[in-house]
Image: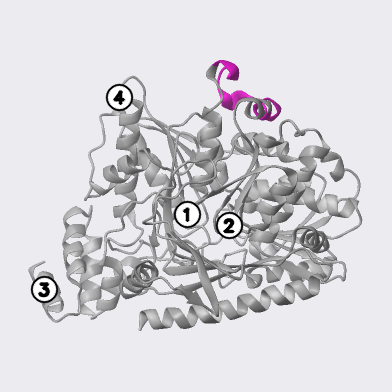
Amino acid sequence: MSDLTSLLDEAAAAGHLLSSSRENIDLLLAGAAGPLAETAIRQLAEAGEWEELNDRFFKTLAFGTGGLRGRTIGGVVTEVEQGDGGPNGRPEHPCVGTATMNFFNVSRAVRGLIAYTRSAVGEGRKPKLVFAHDTRHFSRDFAEYCARVSAELGTDAYLFEDARSTPQLSFMVRELRADAGVVLTASHNPSHDNGFKAYFNDGAQIVEPHASGIIAAVNAIESEVYEPLPADQQGSVTVLGAEADRRYMDKLKSLLMQPQLLEGKSAKVVFTNLHGTGGQITVPMLKELGFEVLTVADQDVRDGRFPTVASPNPENAAALQMGVDLAEKESAEIVIGTDPDSDRMGVVARDGNGEMRLLTGNQIGSLMCWYRSKTAFDIGWLNDTTRARAVIVKTFVTTELQSAIAAKFGLGVVNTLTGFKYIASKLGKYEQAIPADKKGGDYRDLDEDTTRALRLEYSRFFLFGGEESYGYLGCDFVRDKDANGAAVMFAEVAAYAKSVGTTLPDLLDDIYAEYGYHEERGRAMVMEGADGAAKIQALAASYAESPPTELDGAAVERLRDFASQDLFDEEGDELPKEKMIFIDLADGRSFAVRPSGTEPKIKFYLFGKDAPSEDLTASKAKVSGGLDSLWSAIEADAEQRMA
């Protein structure tokens, strides 16, 4: 060990190894459960892989409100990590590091969550935790490990028998009246990443007041070594299988507003889960609803390498291309794709000219928002008396077209910060506002008709919610974005379009003609590693410290700094502080800047719109050209800020 210490000290003195990396290497070595960590560090150091060591150790992977996320396979894989190899060509062991996803950090995370949950539950019963995982490298290993640690530390654990979606985890936390839950996933990140996503007893991702307590409990743990409780004090592990799937699927059927639309000849749908979990629920659900469902055989395979796509992200046209090819071959009308943990859904739909058109997350959400708003009145869910208590909840960076739709129908709109946990917290607020004596017991035992009536009378009825990043929700029995439920809702919109003799893209154009053309662009600057993280933070800070007063020939009319200003939503609730700048220009264009909380990038959101017009082609050209010009100006401005 002394020779390794000398080698590392010399590298730090020469500037090859960051001081934080040097400190974190010692931290990990002191808390590692076996010799693998030391061997991997030695192999990297002796090979002079200082950049790799800095990327792995420049920070400690801190547990945040979104949990943990990071690389689980290194940019450079050491001989000891590769070992005998593992499933789907992965190394035998996850990569060693304090800034990476491995058993060292997963152990800290789950034990901190257990400690906080036990204190919240109090004496008298064992806490209950639910664990799910996607198809990524090491996801099953991490999930089984978490369940075992939980049981050994006196918690009853529930573990899905195989890969399952994030929204199903949320649902089962509520169904089982569990105290917390975890899904091992990195959503649509690159294949080398994984993550630990934590939920509390309401089935939603953790928010205050629990977030600070859990974060503190996790970050206080510096070792993966722990002492199991005596056998008579340990908990149990229960495996969840087909029965849990059935409970979830039966509940999803309640999302249908006009099930009669699905009777007779339904649309032909191509579905791909992009090697993830979506096929477990969405395919049988759509078939039960009467759709003819074709799947992309090569992408049905659950494989953490995501071998047929550059990125398992259903917002990218390339990821859905194999689905489009199958749709063309089989004359299908819709292609639906979900990401590895099936919380995001992307769509390609055939228009009136027979062309397949990729829809953005804002467009998909707006179609569902419009349909559910209109239909709620058609079927009597809402009327002139109750409309004021119905609400659409969206994020600030989601299209204002949904606000225009809500306004036309007299519905409320609430904007939240980015992250579905903030939408979920609104659902919790609306549930809690119902008087206890009116619920007749546990709210979760009530059917959807009953809960809707209660919310309309005593609280607010959540009709639809979503975010531009392909996340949607139309219920409150799940407290996160749900691609399985979104597929059900969107299939109904497709059936409606078919019933009135139009297509989904043409229906969208009809909405634009009535509400005005709205277009949004999502752009990002990717900066990886320790150096990239510093650049992202510096660029984000520059907008707050030196905000623009003019851009692309338009004056800045309003600037909202969500990190420093005291801002409130439409219901008067104060918004948590978040690193996001939102800038409105005098000509009606807007853009927002936000460092990603889960990926090595800084995100830009661009917004343009035009008044309702009979010449939709001209409106589209005008708005699109304005956004092209705005992005060029933003890029040039960002380059100056980083110079």
Q: Indicate the amino acid at tag 4.
A: Asp
Of callouts 2 and 4, the N-terminal one: 4
Q: What residue do we see at 80% from left, 53% from top?
A: 494
User: Closer to the N terminus: mark 3 or mark 1?
Assistant: 3
Query: In which image quadrant can residue 122 be found?
Result: top left
How far apart marks 3 and 4 lie (CA) works out to 47 Å
Q: CA distance from mark 3 to mark 1?
A: 36 Å
Please check the rendered image and state whether residue 448 is part of the magenta-colored stretch, yes or no. Answer: yes
Camera-nearest label, 4 or 1: 1
Mark earlier in primary sequence (2, 3): 3
What is the three-letter code of the residue carrying label 1? Thr
Helix, strand or loop status at disc 4:
helix
Dot in front, 2 or 1: 1
**Residue hosting label 4:** 232
For marks 2 and 4, give the CA distance. 38 Å
Q: Position of residue 113 (x, y in %)?
A: 34, 40
Which range of residues does the magenta coloring cover? 437-452
Residue 9 tag number: 3
Disc on res. 303: none
Query: In the rendered view of the protein, which quadrant contains the N terminus?
Result: bottom left
In-image side of 549 versus 377 (left or right) = left
Q: How busy is the neighbourhood of tag 1: few (under 14 within 10 Å), some, or many (20 plus)?
A: many
Query: Element under label 3?
Result: helix
> Disc 1 marks which residue?
185
How far apart are labels 2 and 1 at the CA level?
10 Å
> From mark 2 to mark 3, how far is it between C-alphas?
43 Å
Residue, x 61% and y 33% (percent of image)? 460
Q: Amino acid at mark 3?
A: Asp
Residue 160 visible here:
no
